[in-house]
Amino acid sequence: MWQSPFDRGVTIHARLAAAVFRHERRLAAQQRRRAPARQASTERKIAVIQLQCRCGAVGIEVSGDPIVQFFCHCDDCQAVHGAAYVPESVYPADAVTVVRGDPASWKLKRNPRFTCRECGTRLFIEVLSLGLRGVNGYLLPSDRFHAEFHMQCQFAVRPVRDELPHFKSRPARFGGSDETVDW
Ligand SMILES: [Zn+2]
Ligand SMILES: [Zn+2]
């Protein structure tokens, strides 16, 4: 079936999110099996960070660790952010809460994206079907963003050379092929 580049971007995102979701559930199940006694008896301390848009009108609270962090070069991210590639930090939806202000919600395709009405800062995307929120990595303190890889490098506007893996689509553990590009 023919797909427009936009539809292809949505499919890529939905597949990635599904793979991330499955990966996370598998890890959680493994952890429960390995350390049931410790988990039951120890209250886990959850780190909370406060984020805000550039003008400060919108405040966001993020609790706990991200499921995954990466740089995405896909054409969907390019269109939405007006950027060559974007840093993404993915969390369960209920870990990302708007605590101040009233961000505008809009859709490029099907998932709502939240933006400050005043300064236009891109805040996060909500992947409705999977209960995930992908926070714009630029909003995080620099010591809280540690990308594991670049992905969707097949769409890259320019090569970005660094020590991270550069996947043509996605890593295998997130449903891709592990194929990398030559930069
Ligand atoms: Zn703002
Ligand atoms: Zn993307």
Image (cartoon, rainbow, N blue to C red):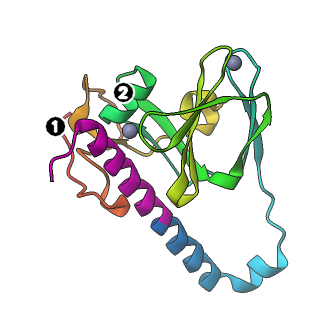
Query: At numbered mark 1, what does the secondary structure look like: helix, strand or loop?
Result: loop
Image quarter where the C terminus lies is top left
Identify the residue under disc 1.
182
Q: Are marks 2 and 1 in contact (CB under 8 Å)?
A: no
Q: Amino acid at mark 1?
A: Asp
Near-viewer residue (165 or 82) = 82
Near-viewer residue (167 or 81) = 81
Magenta stretch, main secondary structure, is helix
The image shows residue 138, relative to residue 181, as above or below, that is above
Q: Which residues are magenta?
A: 1-21
The image shows residue 103, relative to residue 25, as above or below, that is above
Image quadrant in which you'd find residue 159: top left
| Residue 181 picture location, percent across and down | 19, 40
Q: Amino acid at mark 2?
A: Gln
Identify the residue under disc 2.
78
**CA–CA distance in space, label 2 to label 1:** 21 Å
| Residue 136 picture location, percent across and down | 55, 33
Crowding around mark 1 (Cα neighbors within 10 Å: few <14, some 14 to 19, many 20+) is: few
Residue appearing at x 30%, y 27% in the figure: 160
Q: Is residue 63 magenta?
A: no
Residue 181 as seen in the image, left or right of residue 127: left
Residue appearing at x 20%, y 51% in the figure: 179
Ligand 1 position by quadrant: top right
Image quarter where the N terminus lies is bottom left
Disc 2 Cβ-to-ligand 2 distance below 8 Å: yes
Near-viewer residue (95 or 130) = 130
The image shows residue 7, relative to residue 176, as above or below, that is above
The image shows residue 96, relative to residue 18, as above or below, that is above
Q: Is residue 20 magenta?
A: yes
Q: How many labels, in total?
A: 2
Residue appearing at x 35%, y 37% in the figure: 163
Of labels 2 and 1, earlier in sequence is 2
